[in-house]
Amino acid sequence: MTFWKGWSDGKKWAMGIISALIISVIVGSVNWLIKEQEAIPRQEVSFVASSEDTPFAIKSRFEGIAIAEGLELRIKVNNAIISYPRSIGGSNSRSIEDIRVTLAEPREGSWDLVRSSNRLDLDLELEAGNREEIEPFELVIPLQGLDTISGYWLVFDIAETNDSDPINPAFSHAHNRMDLF
């Protein structure tokens, strides 16, 4: 290594540190450019998702704002009501365990789940004929790897159990019935 010949240890250390800094700046810049290419431009839209006209035992309605920006979709729910309008299958109560929201691609009579948020734990008991208003909350859906968010619906998944099967949750769904963006 004739290049380093005659260099003091201090100069070798300084060149090593400078080289490491240059490499880290290059790697950081490339990572930043990749993230910027993936990032969704800011979009904001109001939504209403409901299961009030479905055969589900648990009925729900969610109103709020969906904000897409960068690599996440923030779902800010301002008004949420969950109800158990009547006893179904002999069960007089339902335990609502949690809610999550999913970005879904609509299909004929169904949908494909694309990305899901974190879960909001509720631990709520509903007697037949009762309804509960839920405090405002926010859930976040990661958007990494999606080129676009148009053509998707919001689907709220509500995990519930009842007297006859308190261990295995069933799910009720509320969705906005139209493309979100």
Image (tube, helix red, strand yellow):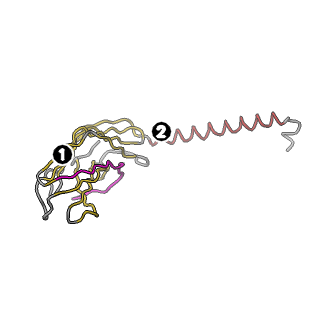
Where, by quadrant of the figure, is residue 93 drawn? bottom left
Residue located at (20% from left, 66% from top) = 164
What amino acid is labelled 1 in the image?
Answer: Glu
Say which element carries label 1.
Answer: strand
How far across and down, in percent of the image, does residue 63 sit? 22, 40
Residue located at (36% from left, 44% from top) = 140
Residue 60 against residue 12 in the figure, above or below? below
How far across and down, in percent of the image, does residue 107 sit? 26, 57
Give the mark nearest the N terminus, 2 or 1. Answer: 2
Say which element carries label 2.
Answer: helix
- Position of 7 with respect to 153 (left or right) is right
Residue 69 against residue 83 in the figure, above or below? above
How far across and down, in percent of the image, does residue 42 sit? 37, 35
Q: Residue at label 1?
A: 132
Residue located at (87% from left, 42% from top) = 2
Q: Which residues are magenta?
A: 108-126
- Position of 23 with respect to 52 (left or right) is right
Q: Residue at label 2?
A: 36
Is residue 15 visible from the viewing direction of this image?
A: yes
Residue located at (14% from left, 50% from top) = 52
Q: Nearer the viewer, residue 118 or 70?
A: 118
Q: Residue 115: within the magenta? A: yes
In which quadrant of the rendered image does the N terminus lie?
A: top right
